[in-house]
Image (cartoon, rainbow, N blue to C red):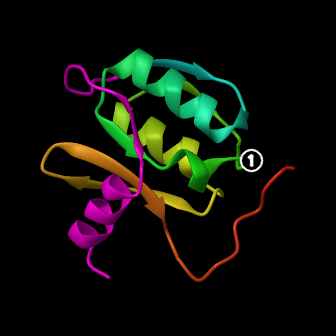
Amino acid sequence: MSKVRFLKAVLAGGASALAFGTAAHAGNFNIPGGDLETALNIYVAQTGTHLIVSEDAVRGVQTRGVHGDLPAEAALQRILAGTGFSAHNESGVIGIVRADPQAPVERIA
């Protein structure tokens, strides 16, 4: 499935836009490890980046978080590292999607 089709399917399937704001920038990130949805919400609050993600898809998924002074894109990559998800930029809005739709995602119940 193409990225564009996937993002349209996610939007049609009840995805939630976590936030809408200004363009991403470099910053000093201090996003703790834990729940991926929470980490993405903190990332959005710090950067104002547009993110679209299915709450159902990330429910129970854990992240190691990110700490340090780095570009917003690098911070997002670190948040997603090891989660089975990746970021895809489509028309200025970043969609958080499964990196490999066939791979299992580790979840905490």
Instruction: Indicate the position of residue 26 as horizontal and vertical percent values.
Output: 33, 23
| 88 lies left or right of 23 | right
**SS for dot 1:** loop
**At which x and y percent is residue 80?**
55, 49
Q: Do we see residue 71 in this rendering?
A: no
Horizontal relation, residue 27 to residue 101: left or right: left
**Whether residue 4 is situated above or below residue 80 in the rendered picture:** below
Picture quadrant of residue 55: top right
Displayed quadrant of residue 10: bottom left
Q: Please state the horizontal and vertical placement of residue 62, each as a whole percent of the image.
A: 73, 45
Q: Which residues are magenta?
A: 1-27
Q: Is residue 34 magenta?
A: no
Return the residue nearer the eye: 16 or 104.
16
Examine the rendered structure and indicate whether residue 36 appears above or below residue 97: above
Image point 27% across, 24% down: which residue? 25
Residue 18 within the magenta-colored segment of the rendering: yes
Point out the image quarter for the N terminus.
bottom left
Disc 1: CA contacts within 10 A as few (<14), some (14-19) or many (>=20) = some
Residue at which label 1 appears: 60
Residue sitting nearer the eye, 75 or 102:
102
User: Left of 74 or right of it: where is 3?
Assistant: left
